[in-house]
């Protein structure tokens, strides 16, 4: 309770101070856009943002720049998204699952085993479907600029390997604050338990949850491998990260500035995808060296257990979107 109270006080102080400096300031002739996220500075997403800033400064001849706040300095994904919506922050990174409440179609990324491969996922993201989803949040004062690779999510546990849905029975599995994620784990047979990312290490350590699910770089950089010695690569979902900007900031930019920012975003996406692959390989090597038992799962059993989560949407708008995505399969 004390930690939560301290964080609330800090956020209130931040909110008061940020109101006075605004989310997009001017410093010595430069336009500075403040960007916040909750990942470690060694994470490929943070490194990609640094690259985006470098390219933005280059394209704009140093008239535009990003001011990046990492490691949850300004709060959780939900908290920084709220700061962005009320106009006290310029940009942020969120999981596609985190904005389902504003862009219901984003739920499609949380559906298990919808994408047959990473190539299929990126063909979707780079299509008109991906662009439409980026713009769908505009009525809620958020505009997507682009996607970052977040790999595929898999299960890890403090107790045992999760090699089949049967192994999830009786296990409390941490999920994001996403109804889609809750439905997936519960349908597989586990007990979905939403826990904030910042509290997950302690929750695993103290047995509040028996396991969680995430991609290899996040599993490694969060140090969850220290308390979770079983990692099963079942790759149930491929949920991209989304870089969003407040419409209050986007609309302040002239056409040239919007072009510079979008170009820098596109370039950082390509750079981040390379960083992500390197980070994934390095993470798997590192956690194995730390004593984690990494196993490949028989995906077919997991797929069969959750197939109804896709077919249930037939005849709905989400079902139509699923159909369009499936048509893009390579």
Image: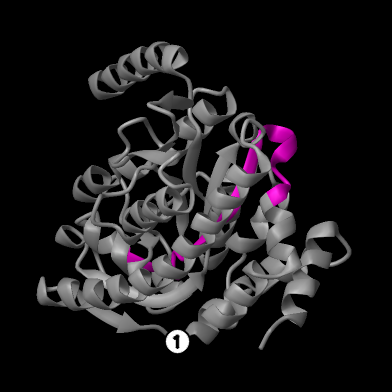
Image height check: is 140 above or below 37? above
Tell me the quadrant of the picture where the C terminus can be found: bottom right
Asked whether residue 153 appears in the rendered view, the answer is no
| 164 relative to 199 in the view: left or right | right
Asked whether residue 139 appears in the rendered view, the answer is yes
Q: Which residue is mark 1?
A: 298
Give 151 or 16, whichever is nearer the viewer: 16
Q: Residue at point 63% right, 38% down?
A: 142
**Helix or strand or loop: what does disc 1 sit on?**
loop
Q: Is residue 121 magenta?
A: no
Q: Which percent across, then down, holds residue 234?
A: 43, 77
Tell me which corner region of the image, top left, top right, bottom left or bottom right, holds residue 206: top left
Work out which residue is located at the far right of the displayed protein and give it: 315
| Span shown in magenta | 135-158
Q: Is residue 147 magenta?
A: yes
Give 155 or 99, whichever is nearer the viewer: 99
Q: Residue at point 14% right, 59% down?
A: 226
Tell me the quadrant of the picture where the N terminus can be found: top left
| 313 relative to 279 in the view: left or right | right
Q: Which percent across, then down, holds residue 311?
A: 76, 71
Q: Which percent across, then down, holds residue 100?
A: 63, 46
Q: Residue at point 45% right, 40% down?
A: 64
| 284 relative to 303 in the view: left or right | left
Q: Residue at point 77% right, 81% down?
A: 327
Tell me which corner region of the image, top left, top right, bottom left or bottom right, holds residue 21: top left
Q: Residues within 10 Å of mark 1 (few under 14, many from 20)?
A: few
């Amino acid at each position: 309770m004390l930690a939560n109270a301290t964080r609330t006080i800090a956020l209130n102080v931040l909110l008061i101070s940020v109101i006075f400096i605004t989310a997009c300031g001017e410093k010595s002739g430069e336009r500075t856009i403040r960007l916040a996220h909750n990942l470690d500075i060694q994470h490929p997403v943070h490194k990609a943002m640094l690259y985006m800033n470098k390219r933005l400064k280059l394209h704009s001849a140093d008239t535009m720049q990003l001011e990046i706040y990492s490691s949850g300095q300004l709060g959780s994904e939900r908290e920084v998204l709220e700061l962005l919506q009320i106009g006290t922050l310029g940009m942020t990174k969120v999981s596609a699952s985190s904005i389902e409440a504003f862009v219901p179609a984003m739920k499609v990324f949380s559906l298990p085993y919808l994408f047959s491969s990473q190539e299929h996922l990126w063909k979707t993201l780079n299509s008109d479907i991906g662009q439409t989803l980026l713009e769908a949040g505009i009525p809620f004062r958020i505009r997507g600029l682009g996607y970052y690779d977040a790999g595929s999510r898999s299960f890890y546990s403090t107790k045992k390997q999760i090699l089949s849905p049967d192994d999830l029975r009786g296990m409390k599995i941490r999920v994001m604050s996403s109804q889609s994620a809750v439905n997936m784990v519960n349908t597989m047979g586990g007990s979905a338990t939403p826990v904030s990312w910042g509290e997950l290490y302690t929750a695993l350590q103290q047995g509040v949850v028996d396991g969680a699910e995430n991609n290899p770089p996040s599993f490694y950089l969060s140090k969850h491998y220290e308390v979770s010695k079983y990692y099963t690569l079942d790759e149930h979902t491929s949920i991209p990260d989304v870089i969003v900007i407040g419409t209050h900031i986007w609309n302040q930019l002239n056409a040239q500035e919007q072009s510079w920012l979008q170009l820098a975003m596109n370039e950082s996406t390509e750079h981040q995808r390379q960083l992500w692959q390197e980070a994934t390989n390095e993470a798997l090597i590192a956690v194995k060296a730390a004593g984690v038992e990494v196993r490949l799962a028989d995906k077919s059993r997991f797929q069969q257990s959750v197939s109804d989560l896709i077919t249930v949407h037939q005849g709905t708008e989400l079902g139509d979107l699923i159909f369009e995505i499936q048509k893009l399969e390579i």
